[in-house]
Amino acid sequence: MNAPIAANAAIATTGLTKRFGDFTAVDDVTLEVPEGAVMGLLGPNGAGKTTLIRMLLGLLTPSAGGGRVLGHDLLTESEAIRRKAGYMSQRFSLYDDLTVDENLTFYGRVYGLKRGPLRERIDELLAWSGLEHMRRAPAGQVGGGLRQRLAFACAILHRPPLLLLDEPTSGVDPVSRRKFWDLIYGLSDTGTTVLVTTHYMDEAEYCDRLGMILAGRLVAHGTPAELRAVHAGGGSLDRVFINLAGRPLSPSPAPQ
Amino acid sequence: MLNRLLALAGKEFIQIRRDKRTLAMMIVLPLLWLVLFGYAFSFDVKEVKVVVIDNSGSPTGALVAKAFREYDRSRVVTLADSSEAGIRAAMYRGDVQMGIIIPPGYAETESSPPMKVILDGSDLFAAQTGTRMIQKALEPVQDEVKAQMQAKAKADLAGRIAEQFQKVKGALLAQVPAPVMAQLGGKLAALQPPADALAFTPPAVPQLVPQVETLYNPDLKSANVMIPGLLGLVVMFMAILMTVLGIVREREHGTLEQLVVTPITPFELMLGKLIPPFVIAAMDFALVYLLGIDLFNLTFAGNFPLFVGLSMLLLFTTLGLGLLLSTVAQNQQQAMQLAMFTIFPQILVSGLIFPLISLPKWVQYIAYLLPFTHYVPIARGMFIKGQGLDQLLVPSLVLAFYAVAALVLASVRFRKRLA
């Protein structure tokens, strides 16, 4: 399944594979994410979503296959990819002992933003994410949904054309999850490509395109409508997943 | 590159400033050690509890006994039972550290028994001090004892001459007829020379107490020997702990992963993580150096820039070790344990506290593998003796080798571990 790589693809991989010893975490994934799309990777925990994202960022070397991210070869140009892409891990990696402002300033400087523009950008993001009042609070005291938004703001400070979100909504209440998707849409409207992994079925509906991952394999991908038509005879996405996996995707709403 | 490095190091310093525990450790620990090593790790015993029993009945014996009792480092103890058994019993109880018994007829004849000294070996340092003070205590009375012996020798001689004279005179007079005897009597008496007229000089007793001159540390103060090594200890401790904790904490919190996907290169990350421990170790070095000199009246005898340079080698070695440990430790607790495991053997066998030569051979071999063992002679040699690179070439080269090896090895492993 060597699909031709479209010129306007933000991400295009062919046969991407990662093995850890006998265990194959990602198995022959050929994936294409068009520029400006919001692409969801849906799959249970341990399906290989995180490993796939880590390979796209050059954090892990593929055992086989390759691809291009933002036009850069992920095997040889991972530094260029990291400079351009934004990444938010499921752990919302923030410095708890730094304030909200200091966290943003630090990541901004790391991405090479100059002092003046950085201040403006931080003000803009704080207003946009509703964190203005928390500015001087230590990040460790910012809870749940706000914390997630802060991590999100840190990831998009440098206006990355591609944003990789690894389970950004895990452990966040449904209302915050809903608001978070509004942020993603807002970003998408500015032309940013978003690749987001999730194990929440309800979030799958929000995506322009969807990939379903099971045991390291990309078992289906397309628009939600396409998937429903092909795999569920026009039924729900839940039905699509059950038909593909033989069981429903386990967790529903996040723990409160 | 510089901008990212500054951002990273700046962030580290903000975090250190907010972390009360680390701040306390940075300031309190060096001070605590300074006091401990300067005052407490002193093996000199000021006073020894002494019992002196004088059974001699001779003036010399009395003089010696008095000398021991009046010596300013003796604390005289009197026992109800003034016998050797009494001393042994008191020593068993711990009331006495040193017993001196001056036997009957001490110093009267060649064959008179020597003075006996009993020491409590369980009180190691008091016993050693006791041995050393015997000579010191006797020093002030040695002239008096000498004069006494010489006067005695002179009196002996005069007595024997007079005796001999009387004998010869008696034999001679026996042959002289009585009338002549009457005439001679008075004149003969005048013939006996007085002892003073003999112009006799008693034999010279050589000065048996030598004049001892201790070079470099005349008062044998332990602070002089401890503080230089302590400088290295503080540097090592701070550098290794700050490095390994700084990295492992970020790994635990997941921020290290986040840093790796930023444009920060592994080299910048390493450098940014090493700069704060470097600065803090250097600050603590300065703190201990200045306070140590001030508190204990030390003088640095060597070339200070060279000393700083060589201390830097130890610092680089330790930063490398810290970085290496950070690639092994899974969490902060492990990091702490590994750091301690790396530091404590070095303190114990480096010669900082116990002399290296007194250790078993196989421990010495291990000791020479440890970097700190090579720093101690550098610190002491430069601090106390003012030694230069020509005397300290070997330990300096070993440290330089360790510094390069540790940093290279650590950076290779660190990059691997990040990927």
Image (cartoon, coloured by chain):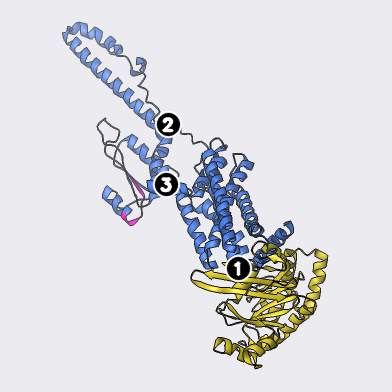
Chain colours: A yellow, B blue
Q: In terms of depth relative to the viewer, which is nearer, B314 or B81?
A: B314
Label 2 to label 1: alpha-carbon separation:
87 Å
> Looking at numbered disc 2 in the image, what kind of residue is underneath it?
Pro
Residue displayed at 21% across by 13% down: B168
Numbered disc in front, either 1 or 3 = 1
The answer, for residue B32, to whether it is visible in the render is no
- Residue B89 in percent (x, y) is at 29, 54
Mark 1 belongs to chain: A
> Looking at numbered disc 1 in the image, what kind of residue is underneath it?
Gly
Q: What's the mark number on residue B365?
A: 3
| Residue B281 drawn above or below residue B174 | below
| Residue under disc 3 on the same chain as residue under disc 2 | yes
| Residue A70 drawn above or below residue B39 | below
Quarter assignment of residue B249: bottom right
Label 1 sits on residue: A65
| Residue A65 drawn above or below residue B57 | below
Label 2 sits on residue: B210
Quarter assignment of residue B414: bottom right
SS at mark 3? helix
